[in-house]
Image (spheres, rainbow, N blue to C red):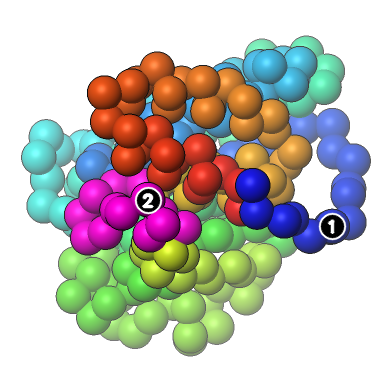
Protein backbone atom coordinates (compact mmCIF):
# COMPACT_ATOMS: atom_id res chain seq x y z
CA UNK A 1 0.00 0.00 0.00
CA UNK A 2 1.37 3.37 -1.01
CA UNK A 3 1.88 5.99 1.65
CA UNK A 4 -0.88 8.60 1.66
CA UNK A 5 -0.56 12.23 2.64
CA UNK A 6 -2.81 13.98 5.14
CA UNK A 7 -5.45 16.38 3.90
CA UNK A 8 -7.83 18.86 5.53
CA UNK A 9 -11.24 17.37 6.28
CA UNK A 10 -14.48 19.24 5.65
CA UNK A 11 -17.77 17.97 7.06
CA UNK A 12 -20.64 17.92 4.54
CA UNK A 13 -24.19 16.71 5.01
CA UNK A 14 -24.60 15.69 1.37
CA UNK A 15 -22.62 15.39 -1.86
CA UNK A 16 -23.73 14.88 -5.47
CA UNK A 17 -21.04 13.36 -7.68
CA UNK A 18 -21.28 12.62 -11.40
CA UNK A 19 -18.91 10.44 -13.41
CA UNK A 20 -19.00 11.05 -17.18
CA UNK A 21 -17.11 9.63 -20.15
CA UNK A 22 -17.35 7.45 -23.23
CA UNK A 23 -19.55 4.37 -22.95
CA UNK A 24 -16.38 2.28 -23.02
CA UNK A 25 -14.72 4.15 -20.16
CA UNK A 26 -16.36 2.07 -17.44
CA UNK A 27 -18.33 4.99 -16.04
CA UNK A 28 -21.32 2.88 -14.96
CA UNK A 29 -19.04 0.43 -13.15
CA UNK A 30 -17.16 3.25 -11.44
CA UNK A 31 -20.41 4.80 -10.25
CA UNK A 32 -21.77 1.46 -9.08
CA UNK A 33 -18.66 0.71 -7.04
CA UNK A 34 -18.63 4.19 -5.53
CA UNK A 35 -22.28 3.63 -4.61
CA UNK A 36 -21.39 0.34 -2.92
CA UNK A 37 -18.62 2.02 -0.95
CA UNK A 38 -21.01 4.79 0.14
CA UNK A 39 -23.61 2.23 1.25
CA UNK A 40 -20.99 0.40 3.32
CA UNK A 41 -20.00 3.75 4.84
CA UNK A 42 -23.59 4.04 6.12
CA UNK A 43 -24.81 6.89 3.91
CA UNK A 44 -28.28 7.24 2.53
CA UNK A 45 -28.11 7.43 -1.25
CA UNK A 46 -29.90 7.71 -4.58
CA UNK A 47 -28.45 7.08 -8.04
CA UNK A 48 -29.15 8.07 -11.62
CA UNK A 49 -27.36 6.20 -14.45
CA UNK A 50 -27.46 8.05 -17.77
CA UNK A 51 -26.70 6.02 -20.89
CA UNK A 52 -25.46 7.29 -24.29
CA UNK A 53 -27.92 8.83 -26.72
CA UNK A 54 -26.64 6.57 -29.50
CA UNK A 55 -25.64 2.91 -29.46
CA UNK A 56 -22.01 2.54 -30.56
CA UNK A 57 -21.57 6.29 -31.04
CA UNK A 58 -18.06 7.28 -32.17
CA UNK A 59 -15.58 7.53 -29.30
CA UNK A 60 -15.23 11.09 -28.09
CA UNK A 61 -18.51 12.24 -29.61
CA UNK A 62 -21.18 14.16 -27.73
CA UNK A 63 -23.76 11.44 -28.44
CA UNK A 64 -21.60 8.72 -26.91
CA UNK A 65 -21.29 10.21 -23.43
CA UNK A 66 -22.29 7.96 -20.54
CA UNK A 67 -22.93 9.27 -17.03
CA UNK A 68 -23.60 8.06 -13.52
CA UNK A 69 -24.78 10.41 -10.76
CA UNK A 70 -24.86 9.58 -7.07
CA UNK A 71 -26.34 11.63 -4.25
CA UNK A 72 -25.09 10.44 -0.84
CA UNK A 73 -25.77 12.01 2.53
CA UNK A 74 -25.96 11.51 6.27
CA UNK A 75 -29.68 12.45 6.51
CA UNK A 76 -32.38 10.68 4.47
CA UNK A 77 -32.56 11.73 0.81
CA UNK A 78 -35.15 11.03 -1.87
CA UNK A 79 -33.64 12.14 -5.21
CA UNK A 80 -30.33 11.65 -7.06
CA UNK A 81 -29.76 15.40 -6.79
CA UNK A 82 -29.93 18.30 -9.20
CA UNK A 83 -26.62 20.08 -9.62
CA UNK A 84 -23.49 17.97 -9.00
CA UNK A 85 -21.05 19.03 -6.32
CA UNK A 86 -18.34 17.10 -8.14
CA UNK A 87 -17.97 16.27 -11.85
CA UNK A 88 -15.43 13.75 -13.11
CA UNK A 89 -15.08 14.16 -16.89
CA UNK A 90 -13.03 11.58 -18.78
CA UNK A 91 -12.86 13.55 -22.05
CA UNK A 92 -13.89 16.86 -23.67
CA UNK A 93 -17.27 15.51 -24.80
CA UNK A 94 -18.11 14.49 -21.24
CA UNK A 95 -17.14 17.95 -20.05
CA UNK A 96 -19.11 19.71 -22.80
CA UNK A 97 -22.35 17.81 -22.10
CA UNK A 98 -22.20 18.01 -18.30
CA UNK A 99 -20.31 21.06 -17.06
CA UNK A 100 -23.34 23.38 -17.23
CA UNK A 101 -24.95 21.26 -14.49
CA UNK A 102 -22.01 21.61 -12.08
CA UNK A 103 -22.72 23.99 -9.24
CA UNK A 104 -20.61 27.19 -9.08
CA UNK A 105 -17.48 26.51 -7.06
CA UNK A 106 -17.91 22.77 -7.56
CA UNK A 107 -15.02 20.36 -7.97
CA UNK A 108 -14.17 19.55 -11.59
CA UNK A 109 -11.78 16.65 -12.22
CA UNK A 110 -10.78 16.07 -15.85
CA UNK A 111 -8.42 13.78 -17.71
CA UNK A 112 -6.02 16.36 -19.08
CA UNK A 113 -4.44 13.88 -21.51
CA UNK A 114 -7.75 13.34 -23.31
CA UNK A 115 -7.92 17.02 -24.34
CA UNK A 116 -6.20 16.43 -27.66
CA UNK A 117 -6.87 18.48 -30.77
CA UNK A 118 -8.90 15.63 -32.26
CA UNK A 119 -11.06 15.12 -29.16
CA UNK A 120 -11.62 18.84 -28.76
CA UNK A 121 -12.81 19.03 -32.36
CA UNK A 122 -15.22 16.10 -31.84
CA UNK A 123 -16.69 17.87 -28.80
CA UNK A 124 -17.11 21.17 -30.66
CA UNK A 125 -14.40 23.13 -28.84
CA UNK A 126 -12.44 25.69 -30.84
CA UNK A 127 -9.82 25.85 -28.06
CA UNK A 128 -9.12 23.88 -24.93
CA UNK A 129 -11.43 24.96 -22.07
CA UNK A 130 -8.62 24.01 -19.70
CA UNK A 131 -6.63 27.00 -20.92
CA UNK A 132 -9.10 29.69 -21.98
CA UNK A 133 -10.51 30.63 -18.56
CA UNK A 134 -14.02 29.37 -19.31
CA UNK A 135 -13.89 27.03 -16.30
CA UNK A 136 -12.90 29.72 -13.79
CA UNK A 137 -16.18 29.31 -11.89
CA UNK A 138 -15.13 25.81 -10.74
CA UNK A 139 -12.34 24.20 -8.75
CA UNK A 140 -10.52 22.65 -11.69
CA UNK A 141 -8.19 19.68 -11.20
CA UNK A 142 -6.65 18.47 -14.48
CA UNK A 143 -5.17 14.99 -13.93
CA UNK A 144 -2.80 13.11 -16.25
CA UNK A 145 -5.02 10.08 -15.89
CA UNK A 146 -3.51 7.76 -18.50
CA UNK A 147 0.09 8.34 -17.38
CA UNK A 148 -0.68 7.97 -13.68
CA UNK A 149 -2.73 4.82 -14.24
CA UNK A 150 0.02 3.26 -16.36
CA UNK A 151 2.55 4.08 -13.65
CA UNK A 152 0.31 2.57 -10.96
CA UNK A 153 -0.04 -0.79 -12.73
CA UNK A 154 3.41 -1.06 -14.36
CA UNK A 155 4.83 -3.24 -11.59
CA UNK A 156 2.35 -6.04 -12.34
CA UNK A 157 3.14 -6.08 -16.04
CA UNK A 158 0.16 -4.20 -17.48
CA UNK A 159 0.73 -1.73 -20.30
CA UNK A 160 -0.99 -0.30 -23.37
CA UNK A 161 -4.69 -1.06 -23.71
CA UNK A 162 -4.71 -3.29 -20.62
CA UNK A 163 -3.40 -0.43 -18.47
CA UNK A 164 -5.76 2.02 -20.18
CA UNK A 165 -8.72 -0.13 -19.07
CA UNK A 166 -7.80 0.60 -15.45
CA UNK A 167 -8.33 4.37 -15.79
CA UNK A 168 -11.86 4.21 -14.41
CA UNK A 169 -10.60 2.55 -11.23
CA UNK A 170 -7.97 5.24 -10.87
CA UNK A 171 -10.86 7.73 -10.90
CA UNK A 172 -12.66 5.57 -8.36
CA UNK A 173 -9.57 5.53 -6.16
CA UNK A 174 -9.17 9.30 -6.43
CA UNK A 175 -12.78 10.03 -5.48
CA UNK A 176 -12.79 7.34 -2.78
CA UNK A 177 -9.75 9.05 -1.25
CA UNK A 178 -11.38 12.46 -1.62
CA UNK A 179 -14.53 11.43 0.26
CA UNK A 180 -13.09 8.85 2.66
CA UNK A 181 -14.94 5.92 1.10
CA UNK A 182 -14.03 2.41 2.35
CA UNK A 183 -12.28 0.63 -0.54
CA UNK A 184 -12.51 -2.92 0.87
CA UNK A 185 -15.79 -3.68 -0.99
CA UNK A 186 -14.14 -2.70 -4.28
CA UNK A 187 -11.10 -4.85 -3.61
CA UNK A 188 -13.35 -7.83 -2.83
CA UNK A 189 -15.29 -7.21 -6.06
CA UNK A 190 -12.08 -7.09 -8.12
CA UNK A 191 -10.80 -10.31 -6.57
CA UNK A 192 -14.06 -12.10 -7.39
CA UNK A 193 -14.46 -10.60 -10.87
CA UNK A 194 -10.90 -11.24 -12.07
CA UNK A 195 -10.10 -14.41 -10.14
CA UNK A 196 -8.85 -16.01 -13.38
CA UNK A 197 -6.78 -12.98 -14.42
CA UNK A 198 -4.21 -12.40 -11.66
CA UNK A 199 -2.68 -9.36 -13.34
CA UNK A 200 -5.94 -7.43 -13.07
CA UNK A 201 -6.46 -8.65 -9.51
CA UNK A 202 -2.99 -7.32 -8.66
CA UNK A 203 -3.41 -4.09 -10.60
CA UNK A 204 -6.85 -2.75 -9.76
CA UNK A 205 -6.57 -2.97 -5.95
CA UNK A 206 -3.40 -0.87 -6.29
CA UNK A 207 -5.23 1.90 -8.12
CA UNK A 208 -7.60 2.88 -5.26
CA UNK A 209 -4.59 3.53 -2.97
CA UNK A 210 -4.17 6.97 -4.52
> Is residue 15 toward the left or the right of residue 50 in the image?
right
> Is residue 21 toward the left or the right of residue 13 in the image?
left
Q: Please give the name of the residue rendered at 29% of the width and 82% of the height, measured from the top-left corner.
A: 126
Mark count: 2
Tell me the magenta residue range: 152-166
> Crowdedness of circle 2 by 10 Å Cα count: few (<14), some, many (20+)?
some
Residue 133: image x %, image y %? 55, 83
Q: Please give the name of the residue rendered at 84% of the width and 57% of the height, measured from the top-left corner.
A: 6
From the viewer's side, name the closer residue of 49 and 200: 200
From the viewer's side, name the closer residue of 64 and 126: 64
Q: Please give the name of the residue rendered at 40% of the width and 17% of the height, measured from the top-left corner.
A: 192
Q: CA distance from mark 1 to mark 2?
A: 27 Å
Element on which disc 1 rests: loop
Residue 145 seen in the figure = no
Q: Quadrant of residue 74?
A: top right
> Is residue 15 toward the left or the right of residue 125 in the image?
right
Residue 129: image x %, image y %? 44, 77
Secondary structure mainly formed by the magenta segment: helix
In the rendering, which numbered label is found on residue 156?
2
Amino acid sequence: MAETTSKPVEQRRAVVIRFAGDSGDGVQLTGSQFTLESAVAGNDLATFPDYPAEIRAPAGSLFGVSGFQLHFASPPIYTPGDHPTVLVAMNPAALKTNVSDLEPGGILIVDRESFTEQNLKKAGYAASPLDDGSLAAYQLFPVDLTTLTARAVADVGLAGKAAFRCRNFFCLGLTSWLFHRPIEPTIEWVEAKFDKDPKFVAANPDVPYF
